[in-house]
Image (tube, grey):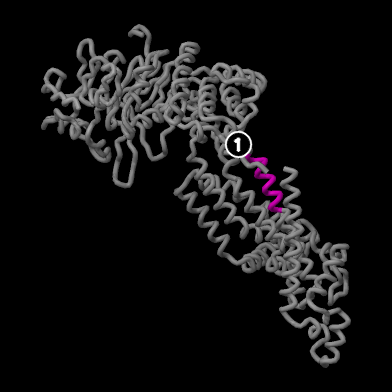
Amino acid sequence: MDSATPPILKVEGMSVDIKVPAGMLHAVNRIDFSVNPGETFCIVGESGCGKTMTSLALMRLLPRSAKLTADKLEFDGHDLLNMSEARMAELRGDRLGMIFQDPMTSLNPVYTIGDQLEEVYLRHRKSTRKEARARAEFMLERVGIMSPALRLRQYPHQLSGGLRQRVMIAMTLMCEPRLVIADEPTTALDVTVQVQILQLLARLQKEFGMAIILITHNLGIVARMADHLAVMYAGKIVETGSAVDVFTRPQHPYTQGLLRCMPTHDHGAQVSRLGSIPGIVPSLIGEQHGCGFRNRCEFARDICASGEIELRTPQGASAYRCVLSPDERPARVVEAAQ
Amino acid sequence: MVRFIAGRLAMLALVALTVSFIGFGLLRLSGDLAAVLAGETASPADIARVAKQYGLDKPLYMQYLDWAGRALQGDLGRSLFTHEPVVELILARIGVTIRLAFSALAFALVFALPLGVLAALRKNSWIDRAVLTLSVLGQAIPSFWLGLLFIYLFGVILRWLPISGSDTAWHFVMPTITLGLSTMPALMRLTRTGMIDVLSSDYIRTAWAKGLHPMSVLFKHALRNAVLPVVSLSAVMLGFLLGGSVIVESVFALNGIGLLAFDSIKRIDFPVVQSILVFLSFCYILLTLISDIINAQLDPRIAL
């Protein structure tokens, strides 16, 4: 995708602030990104970095205590920020879909699979129950479920976790949305099933042409799926760019650290020691100054603590927020192989 | 399902046996029936004669077996005071009690469900607090006082409603509201807690993410899950109401089971009290059976 086609989603200066007893928690802090039609955009980061809040904000499904602000929040020509709740509900499930983390609890236990699939279609399309049923059966087939007619009559508790996530995906795709937000869609599943679900998502994306925002903490998934990605840390995007750029030439110390935490097979039979990033994520309560990563960063210096860190956009590499370019940082002390 | 119902019915027989036996024993311990029957001025010889006449001189288990044998044939005996058959006494009054019990429960549910849902939706808002205050009031205000207040306001001052008797549907309005208001709070709080729980669940977030209409999210997806414990409690409440509310029945002069039981206990009218006891235990078991069947219909995960 190049700049010729306008992005399907454009986010500028989006923040999510949550009122907690101790003060204001800045879960998401002025982030910008855009997603092209039909591409996979990954948001990656550790727990508590704001990635789930970002996805709920895009769906406008934030909890009541959370406040969403943005300079711009544009989806497929619609201004999501100022849209009425009723109009927003018309978009959800139709043009904009979401797949959740835990398929065991994300389906309503007291209704059949068929009922839960059909109701999306009946809500957003002028159709009869029969058409909705045919559509549901078709979608179950598309997500690789055997004997869909039987499954439609079953209840969620009669299905395995992997099957339920396939049902969730089928449900999200009932109206062929332009954008699907998948929040850790494989985290709750067995490793073997994870791969199947990811392959399925990639195949369906080709078939239906939707864009996917994939939220994950797993860099292996990012490497497999992403066209573009954003690395989030402490509520901010610290690095963003094409998957190739970020994986081959990571610019931000946090991204570099993350990549060192990823098991690789580059060394043949010799297994290298797996890296880790010392320290913990800072508290996001109260006013945030400087770089959120500075207390865990080996290159940190005084200027990291003050002001807003500017986004640097080098030629031929990903954009990042750090006061030092990779060349300006002292050479990393190579750990002695153990 | 069939096995489940058969099992419950077998349990019904066991409970009937136990309740009637314990009731029999307790009633006998509560006073010397022969002395009461013979009257205050009776001599010991008179009392012995009365005891022999009513079979009260036999051992307790023999008396019980006599009673149980006749009860199984549908003969619950006669009242020791009015000498009417107990079956007729109960049948004559059960209609009033059933009407009162069902209308009070219906009244309670009609308000408890929507108010509980509303309070859950606006948790910690003024609406929630108002609903909770109402429920505390409903539980704290004694029925006899509320009943008298209603009689004074709607019967005496405004003259809108009849104040006693059970001739028309209008006669049931005030008793229903009085009884319903004391039944409502527990049901309402259970609805509220259930809804708060369910509304924060993942599948409700899914329902919102599907863009469903708020009414569909709340009443189709949430309420059906939240209402299961409310069904169970309603059954218990209904059993309680069928036992008759002595206070409400006496305030509004409704000739129901509650009043009959109360009078019979005062007079140690043993056959009547014993029969009502067994009847009520039957009601409880049947009602829990029905509520279990309803819940199994509402939630496919419950296998009977």
Q: Which residue is mark 1?
A: A110
Magenta segment: B287-299
Against B148, residue A56 (above or below) is above
Quadrant containing the N terminus of chain B is top right
Kind of element beneath mark 1: loop
Against B194, residue A63 (above or below) is above
Q: Could one spot residue B247 in this view of the protein?
A: yes
Q: Position of residue B161 (x, y in %)?
A: 72, 60
Judged left or right of residue A311, residue B89 is right
What residue is at 47 percent from the left and 32 percent from the top?
A102
Judged left or right of residue B111, residue B241 is right
Looking at the picture, tell me which residue is in the foreground, B66 or A336: A336
Q: Position of residue A234 (x, y in %)?
A: 27, 32
Point out the residue furthest to the front here: A269
Judged left or right of residue A48, residue B246 is right
Q: Is residue B107 magenta?
A: no
**Res B279 → quadrant:** bottom right
